[in-house]
Image: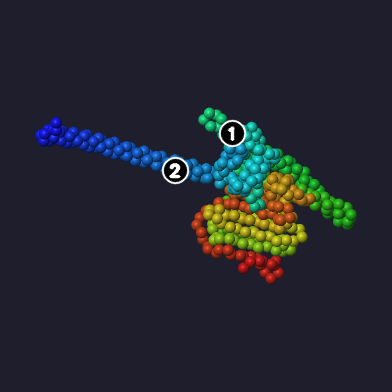
Amino acid sequence: MKPGKDEELELLSRALETFHQASGQLEQTYCQLEEKVETLTRELEKKNRDLVRNLEEKEKVKCYLHNILESLRTGVIVLDLSCRITVCNRAVEELIGDSPQRIQEKGVAAALGVTGTFSGGRKELEHLMKVLDQTSMVRSKGRRERTIHLTTSVLNDEEETVIGGIILLKDVTEIRRLEEEAARRNRLTSMGEMAANIAHEIRNPLGGIELFASLLKKELQEDPERLELVENISAGVKSLNHILSNLLYYTRPLRPVFLPLSVQGILEESLVFAGHVLKQKGITWTCVHEGEDRELISDGELLKQVLMNLILNAVQAMPRGGALQVVSEIEEEVVEFRVSDNGPGIPEEDLQKIFHPFYTTRPKGTGLGLAIVHQLVETLGGKISVESRPGEGTTFTLHFPLAGRPSVSEKGRLFAPFARETDPVITGC
């Protein structure tokens, strides 16, 4: 029996109502889902922002640590368990003169002056660290040698497992120089006191010998043979007196008078006094002041004595003639004087001893000239260094702090105030 129209309408109405209910529920569910998606999207965006921020912070920290590592004056080499370089900062290349690639090609051990093959592995790495630890190596940069000190340690992870090794390289040249200087001063202090006492004791009888020798010379004017013997005695007394005078000068306290001086003027005056000796020995010379003239607060007489002693020292190193160059140069607040000769040079084993009193390589030298120069330079607040290679000549370099403002502007001026037609050749423009 077919339903009537009323029943059909009722069924359709119920179906529509059910559809509306289902549609409403679906719409409600969709809205809830939209809200969840929107919530998840916001959370995901927040997570992404946090992740990006963390990555940026990590990158900043990484760059910061890298900049710190590259700015260190201490060389840092990090090795893995295979003894391969994983980190090598800029200071390493500056200290030993090899790039990380070149060090890897040579092998870390060979590049750092250690013989033997280290193939890798924890035991090999630990052995390499022990061999390198607390060792020193010497590297040359131009004519200057530097002492590099090495310290090492193994690299552990959180569980104290060895995962690599760290090698630190430090330039200790200046520290070693200061240590040697301190030891030298201690030796010289005690020796100077003793030498001064001995010199005074010797000078008294020496004066008597000289007096008696002069009386004998008057008595033996008509006896040439004996007169010659007495003259030899007098010459010996004068030589001893000269040595004692230098010794007393070296040991006595100095009281410099500091006044404003022209850097260029000091250089010119020093060569005026030395010019006669240079001409006699057949030595050609150049005298150059580089940069603008400045005022130097120092004791002019003592400073001229330093320069003249270095010039005369160069003359003695060139008995058969040669070339001498004296240069003054100003950089920032420091004046540098350089006295260079093309003589035979100084052997490396003698370089550390030339400023020691009584050390000399010349048969008739007293060994006090350069010791006095060193003392005067220190008294004037400066520093002195020497560079030399056998067969290539020697250069003494003085550094003094400046004071005052620039005065005369004469860049690159070449001067020879005592030059005449008969003088040695002066090169330059």
Tell me if 405 is positioned left or right of 377 in this view. Answer: left
Residue with the most extreme top position:
159
Residue with the most extreme front position:
1
Q: Secondary structure at mark 1?
A: strand
Residue type highlighted by circle 2:
Lys
Above or below, 355 against 157 in this view is below
Residue drawn at 50 percent across, 43 percent down: 66
**How far from the left and from the top, in percent, is residue 114?**
68, 40
The count of marks equals 2
State the quadrant of the N terminus.
top left
**How far from the left and from the top, in percent, is residue 172?**
61, 42
In this view, the residue in front, 82 or 133, is: 82
Residue type highlighted by circle 1:
Val
Residue drawn at 27 percent across, 38 percent down: 34
In this view, the residue in front, 126 or 170, is: 126
Task: Give the CA distance from mark 2 to mark 1.
Answer: 27 Å
Residue 370 in sight in this render: yes
Tell me the tag on residue 405. Answer: none
Residue linked to disc 1:
154
Residue linked to disc 2:
60
**How far from the left and from the top, in percent, is residue 219?**
85, 53
Q: Earlier in the sequence, mark 2 or mark 1?
A: 2
Q: Secondary structure at mark 2?
A: helix
